[in-house]
Image (cartoon, grey):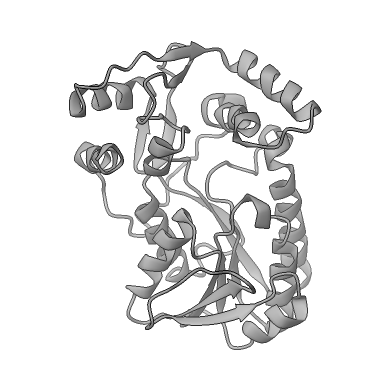
Amino acid sequence: MTTILNVAIAGASGALGSAVLSKLVATPHLNVRVLRNLGSKSVFPPAIQVTDVDYSSTEELTRALADQHALVSTVGAPGISGQLQLIDACIAAGVNRFIPSDFGVDLENPNAQKLPLFIPKARIHQYLVDKCNTTGISYTYIYTGSFLDWGFKNNMSFDVLSDTPTIVGDGNLSFSGILLPTTGEAVVGVLNNLVATKNRAVFVRDFITTQNQPLAMARRIAPERHYNPVHAELDDLQDAADDRLAQGLYDMETFRPYIYRAMFDPAYRREPLALDNQLLRISEKSEADLEEAMKAVLG
């Protein structure tokens, strides 16, 4: 198959899923089906086809995917392990391409695979690769770096809503970042380039930045706020995360330092030989786009 017409999306109600869904439905030749987990109260526009299905049932998922050419997964952390059922259902239904919910960290880096937060994703990664070697399904991973707009309001790349945002090191550690709508563009780009993206990771980004850069931007946009950043070393943050994990505390305070490790430590990421922005027809972003995203959070 070289052309995708029917595409399903799982996990379409979250921040990432909504952004991806918006780009999918705006693509004229795509027929989009939302797979809504049974019992979910998520509401979608009337024009969007929605199928309610038990995500834990491979049989139900197979029926829901019977006429689909591709499945995009944007499920959140609680649904990562459940992608095993999604993969099996895709194979049973004859779905050609599966794009897993793994849009940030480069899980082909063996160090990143060992970070506690990413172990479930690494298992899915290996399972999917193995299945692609023995069945007709294919995959594409989309590695984006940090979601900058989402991170602005969720204490990740830079917490603009806190007067005491965490700054790792001196704040000059560089990292790749992307805006959520661009991730949707990348998904559409993959579906439009099946051959060139088959069974590999694609690398896309909008910006290379540091934490000090959005800090300066926030001070310029909101001079009435008094930012007093708290500097922390990466090793100290991860040591604290390891302690919390040992206590059975499974929350973002525990997991955030592992994300920082994958973002900032060169040993846990790789610089791609070439970006896939041009292949996927990613629109070029400017600092003004990043500023607008920050203004939307600051209000």
Q: Residue at x 42, y 71 (%)?
A: 192
Quarter occupied by the C terminus:
top left
Q: Is residue 136 visible?
A: no
Quarter occupied by the N terminus:
bottom right
Above or below, comparing residue 177 to residue 99 in the picture? above
Q: Is residue 281 left or right of residue 15?
A: left
Estimate the x, y position of residue 99 in percent, counting from the top left.
57, 63
Estimate the x, y position of residue 282 in percent, counting from the top left.
33, 55
Viewer-proximal residue among 75 and 146: 75
Q: Is residue 90 visible?
A: yes
Above or below, comparing residue 70 to residue 289 in the picture? below
**Toward which corner of the image does residue 132 lie, by quadrant?**
bottom right
Q: Is residue 131 left or right of residue 143?
A: right
Above or below, comparing residue 40 to residue 243 in the picture? below
Estimate the x, y position of residue 109 in percent, counting from the top left.
65, 38
Above or below, comparing residue 274 to residue 222 in the picture? below
Q: Residue at x 70, y 68 (%)?
A: 87
**Toward which corner of the image does residue 111 lie, by quadrant?**
top right
Q: Residue at x 50, y 35 (%)?
A: 271
Estimate the x, y position of residue 156 in percent, counting from the top left.
48, 33
Viewer-proximal residue among 52 and 192: 52
Q: Is residue 58 left or right of residue 219?
A: right
Q: Residue at x 61, y 64 (%)?
A: 139
